[in-house]
Image (cartoon, rainbow, N blue to C red):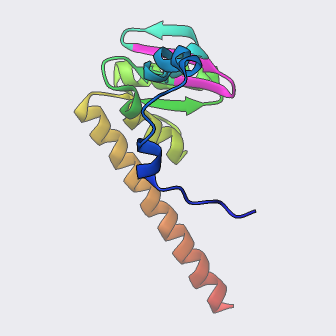
Amino acid sequence: MAKKWIDGNKIAEVTEMPEDLYRYDDLMKSVPNFDKTDGAKKVYSRKEYIILQVKKGYVVYNTTRPFEKSHTHLRSFSMAKTIIDNCIIKKAPKTNNLYLLESHVRVSDDTKYIKLVEELIEAKRDKDKLKYRNKNINSKKK
């Protein structure tokens, strides 16, 4: 079935609106609620950090910064608490997981700590490149 094109001017010519449609006027003019925290339950807080429980895990959020720029999603509650603890006491993470290292950067607001973790991320990426290069060099020698 083909869609029929209707000129916008013809639609604009209609000046009278049926009265039964006016009951939806307030609903259409209202601002939709896009607040995602309705489905999330706060399960932990320490200083400016909170942990929200969501459907598939947990969200760590730094309340001093905008939500879009300062939250991370994790599956483990204990890892969420560890990230908060590391950010508060400025402890270098022991993990080599890039996602977890980037989570530390996203959640923290201390520039020195962020720089420290970013250096760890760069070292990890450089180490992976070396492993890949050495692996290819060794396979060609055989």
Q: Which residue appears at 36% of the width and 18% of the height?
A: 88
Spot occupied by residue 36 in the image (x, y as percentages of width and height): 53, 22
**Quadrant in which the C terminus appears:** bottom right
| Residue found farthest to the left | 111
Residue 51 part of the magenta-drawn span: yes
Above or below, 126 against 50 in this view is: below
Tell me, yes or no, if residue 92 can be seen here: no
Part of the protein shown in magenta: 49-59
Residue 14, image quadrant = top left
Residue 23, image quadrant = top right
Above or below, 1 against 71 in this view is: below
Q: Which residue appears at 38% of the width and 37% of the height?
A: 105
Q: Is residue 120 left or right of residue 110?
A: right
Q: Looking at the image, which is closer to me, 116 or 41?
A: 41
Spot occupied by residue 47 in the image (x, y as percentages of width and height): 37, 9
Q: Looking at the image, which is closer to me, 36 or 104?
A: 36
Q: Which residue appears at 33% of the width and 48% of the height?
A: 119
Spot occupied by residue 55 in the image (x, y as percentages of width and height): 69, 24
| Residue found farthest to the bottom | 141
Tell me, yes or no, if residue 72 can be seen here: yes
Q: Which residue appears at 44% of the width and 18% of the height?
A: 30
